[in-house]
Image (cartoon, rainbow, N blue to C red):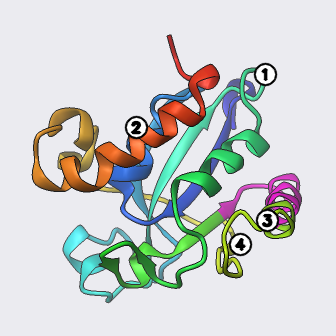
Amino acid sequence: MANDREIATLGGGCFWCTEAVFQDLRGVERVQSGYSGGHVRNPTYEEVCRKQTGHAEVVQVTFDPSVISFREILEVFFTVHDPTTPNRQGADEGPQYRSAIFYHSPEQKAVAEEVMRDVAERRIWGDPLVTEVAQFTEFFPAESYHDDYFRRNPYQGYCQVVIAPKVSKFRKQYLEKLKA
């Protein structure tokens, strides 16, 4: 965490979806798709998709905590994916699509547990949360063709059917937190 910036590593299903949402948040300086939580060094997308590595598709979000807090990042996270479906987001199925928070500090772990309790108590989702909370160990950047996927491919079928509605819902709900 250089220069008073923090990093959040989050798995919310397909990283194209979570990248598209977090790129729009004020205070977020960088979002990079990649893989965490597995047992293979430098996994490829194909290996992760074949369920051979144990990794989740994640985004690493670099943010300025004086503009947006880790708590606010997690509040967005819990509204833009379904944290109640083990190893699944919509039609995307497999352990790489699990809901996960890979915390970078004891403070992040405490905030994650607190936000999860709050989300569960408020019954935002009908079913119990299955989000994995694990200590961050390593992040492996995804192949470059995943970078800015939604921005570069807005008319691709998956982007139109899955990502665009999610981004639209997010923008309406968090209008005051969007970048200008």
C-alpha distance separating marks 3 and 4: 10 Å
Task: Pick whichever of labels 2 and 1 is earlier in the sequence.
Answer: 1
Under mark 1, the amino acid is Ser
- Residue with the mark numbered 3: 116
Disc 3 or disc 4, which is closer to the eye?
A: 3
Residue at coordinates 54% horizontally, 67% vertically from top-left? 82
Between 117 and 56, the residue placed more toward the observer is: 117
Under mark 2, the amino acid is Ser
The answer to whether one can see residue 15 in this image is yes
Task: Pick whichever of labels 3 and 4 is earlier in the sequence.
Answer: 3
Q: Is the magenta stretch mostly helix, strand or loop?
A: helix
Between 22 and 51, the residue placed more toward the observer is: 22
User: Mark 4 and mark 3 in contact (Cβ < 8 Å)?
Assistant: yes
Where disc 3 sits, the SS reads: helix
Under mark 3, the amino acid is Met
- Residue with the mark numbered 1: 66
